[in-house]
Amino acid sequence: MNSSQMKMLLLVAIGCILWFIPTPEGLTDQAWQMMAIFVTTVLSLILAPLPLGAMALMGLTLATLLGVLPIKTALTGFAHPTIWMIAAAFFISRGFITTGFGRRVGYWFISKLGHNSLGLAYGLVLTDLLFAPATPSTTARCGGIISPLFRSVANAYDSDPEKGTENRIGAFLVQCIFQCNAITCAMFLTSMAGNPLAANFAKEQGVEITWAGWATAAIVPGLLCLFLIPLVMYMVFPPELKKTPEMREIARQKLAEMGKMTRDELMVCITFIGMVSLWVLGPTLGIHATVTALLGLVFLLLTHTITWDAVLGEKEAWHTITWFAVLVMMAAQLNKLGFISWFSESMAESLSGFGWVTTIVVLLLVYYYSHYLMASAMAHISAMYSAFLAIAISAGAPPMLAAIVLGIFSNLYMSTTHYSSGPAPILFGAGFHTLQNWWKIGFIFSLIVIPIFVFVGGAWWKLLGLW
């Protein structure tokens, strides 16, 4: 029996045990059965005996086959606006890569800041930050835009793990990119595929997070982290090469080779600026965030900047639509059937002796460090976000504060291990760090990032009136 079959048998056993446990007082049989299917589905995303989309479809099929939900209800997740906002953003982000616009912006930053290794780090981080609002695929953003730029710099200075020269500059840059990528993911509702999922879970509990609301809450602690992380990395894990005067000229040469901005690059640039503007002004203008994303996609299709075949070939987007829709539907049904309110009330009673501040800090620490057990941010959000939000609100935490902070922390923990996010295996696989060093740096920077978001972020959120 192979590993996948063992995992599948384990899931069947867990599902059966949960299904046949007597329904607790205060819940209907349907609510408990829905919980059993949801928990088993989430565990299947973590264990992954099959791809996430396949496991999610199994959960949906079981919910209908066992009579817990009618098929029309089970398919409602595919009509959710959030699903199509994130899908459209996936499709559009491909344009940053295929047109070369992402590389052009990266080389421009390097040409301005690349006079030393610290400046190079800031140039790469700023490139990541610039494209984060419209690139929900962290793997595409890091693998398609940032990683090629980083490798170009490392190669220029012969920083190569195979030659034993990884510490010349590559080891420093790769960790700056990795640590800061988690921050850029945390700063916008559309900068990581799991963020809209968290926002949807919050909405099911009566808390509606807007694009501008999320960005405003994250901007101050996020920018502070992006400033401090390369600086602290430079002091604690310094590169051997401090001055890089040649890099600015190399970047200028690369830009010269690329020539003038092409028509397709210009179309992508216009789309990017237009989308971010409408996401900020959307609530005032009455334009839904999903409409903005679809408008951007339609514009790129009409201008032939991207093709419909390219949209159909964007496997990661269609894969995300599938598992995302199923989880959104299941979360909505858990709330509708009364499980979330029952669970939060039960937890509130057990935590009645603690204040809401203590409760939410403990929840955030558990939420962050439990990611060492996870290989997917989306699976982590699916498993814990709703429950932790319900506990925080029941303890007296302001609902909007709790929802946004848990959403932000749903990204911060992606800087921990070599399997903690999509970019992690890409960057770790470059070979510039040992596994031990990678984990050590991840833990050390958690001791910097968490206090910044708790204390500086807390003060900022107080000014915003979130608590």
Image (tube, rainbow, N blue to C red):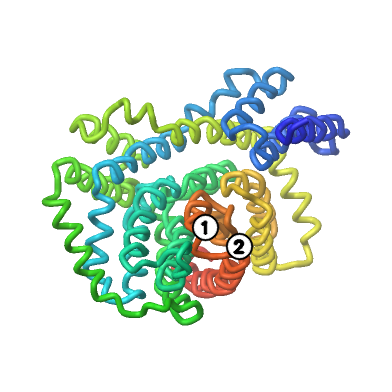
Residue placed at 30% from the left, 50% from the top?
Answer: 276
Q: Which mark is residue 428?
A: 1
309 or 247: nearer the viewer: 247
Residue at the farthest front position: 163
Residue placed at 46% from the left, 49% from the top?
Answer: 192
Q: Amino acid at mark 1?
A: Phe
Residue at the farthest bottom position: 235
Quarter of the rendering containing residue 154: bottom left
Residue 348 against residue 197 in the figure, above or below? below
Q: Position of residue 359 (x, y in %)?
A: 69, 64
Q: CA distance from mark 2 to mark 1?
A: 8 Å
Which residue bears the numbered disc 2?
A: 435
Residue placed at 18% from the left, 33% from the top?
Answer: 303
Residue 295 against residue 414 in the figure, above or below? above
Quarter of the rendering containing residue 356: bottom right
Would residue 74 be visible to someone looking at this image?
Answer: yes
Residue 68 against residue 279 in the figure, above or below? above
Q: Secondary structure at mark 2?
A: helix
Q: Considering the image in quadrants, where does the N terminus appear? A: top right
